[in-house]
Image (cartoon, helix red, strand yellow):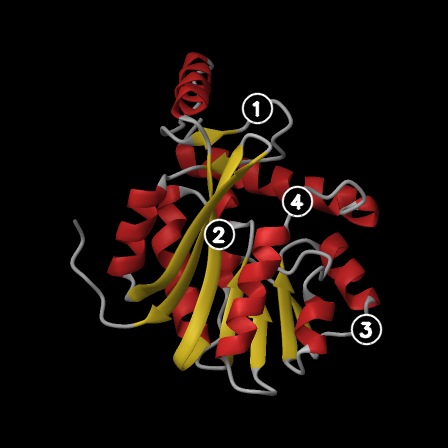
């Protein structure tokens, strides 16, 4: 199987999994206290009554927090099921069914939130997704995103398994066990390199490990792009 066909298949499986789980998604929600702390930090840094893009927004779990702070919310997600749950909250100003790869906003938001989502983006698409997020914010705006981390022994074991099955995988990809559709773990240094290439400067950074998963938290601001390393 060619890699692009395989990735398209994985992406479709991911969307199908989220659509299937939408009605009960969040019933057994993993800890997100640190994510909420970082969202609160973003909200303190943008103008009162500012505009915020939550992409992908999922069921809109952060919408009440954003609305309580007086901000106007736009949500985007590629899952119709997740968007239906987000719409049912009746909070967002607008909702759009689209993927991170296809975001087309330009200079519209004071902040963009991309939380617990980049692990679903293959390495080929990371630069384009980051460019989309950067383009969506106004000058001086902020991008908050998380980068999930998995232990190297898990990454190596997954890569060996995928290769043994004849699949066109690269190191860092995971599609087994309880992983719906597709995950990719680039590691902090690769993510930071891509930030620089797309002109996203790190304002603040944090890390926490919970339940065997690590999460890097990045607050980014558009700036000059750096050369590829």
Q: As rendered, which of 62 and 75 lies closer to the eye?
A: 62
Above or below for 219 versus 8: below
Cα separation between marks 3 and 1: 36 Å
Mark identifier at residue 146: 2
Above or below for 10 versus 195: above
Circle 2 SS class? strand
Q: Name the residue under label 3.
A: 90
Residue appearing at x 54%, y 36% in the figure? 182
Cα separation between marks 4 and 3: 25 Å
Q: Mark 1 points at which residue?
A: 176
Q: As rendered, which of 92 and 16 lies closer to the eye?
A: 92
Cα separation between marks 2 and 1: 22 Å
Is disc 3 in contact with disc 1, using a CB cutoff of under 8 Å?
no
Is disc 4 in contact with disc 3, using a CB cutoff of under 8 Å?
no
Q: Name the residue under label 4.
A: 31
Chain-order first, disc 2 or disc 1: 2
Circle 1 SS class? loop
Chain-order first, disc 4 or disc 1: 4
Placement of the N terminus among the 4 image quadrants:
top left
């Amino acid at each position: 199987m060619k890699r692009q066909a395989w990735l398209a298949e994985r992406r479709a499986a991911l969307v199908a999994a989220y659509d299937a789980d939408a009605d009960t998604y969040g019933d057994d929600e993993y800890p997100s206290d640190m994510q909420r702390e970082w969202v609160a930090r973003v909200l303190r840094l943008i103008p009162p009554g500012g505009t915020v893009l939550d992409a992908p927004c999922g069921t809109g779990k952060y919408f009440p927090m954003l609305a309580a702070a007086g901000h106007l919310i736009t949500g985007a997600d590629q899952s119709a099921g997740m968007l239906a749950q987000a719409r049912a909250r009746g909070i967002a100003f607008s909702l759009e069914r689209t993927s991170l790869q296809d975001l087309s906003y330009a200079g519209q938001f004071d902040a963009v939130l991309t939380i617990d989502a980049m692990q679903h983006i293959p390495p080929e698409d990371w630069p384009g997704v980051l460019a989309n997020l950067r383009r969506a914010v106004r000058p001086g705006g902020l991008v908050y995103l998380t980068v999930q981390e998995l232990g190297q022994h898990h990454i190596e074991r997954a890569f060996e398994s995928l290769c043994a099955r004849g699949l066109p995988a690269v190191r860092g990809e995971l599609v087994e066990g309880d992983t719906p559709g597709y995950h990719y773990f680039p590691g902090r240094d690769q993510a930071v390199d891509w930030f620089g290439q797309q002109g996203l400067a790190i304002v603040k950074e944090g890390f926490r490990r919970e339940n065997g998963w690590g999460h890097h938290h990045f607050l980014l601001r558009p700036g000059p792009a750096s050369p590829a390393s």
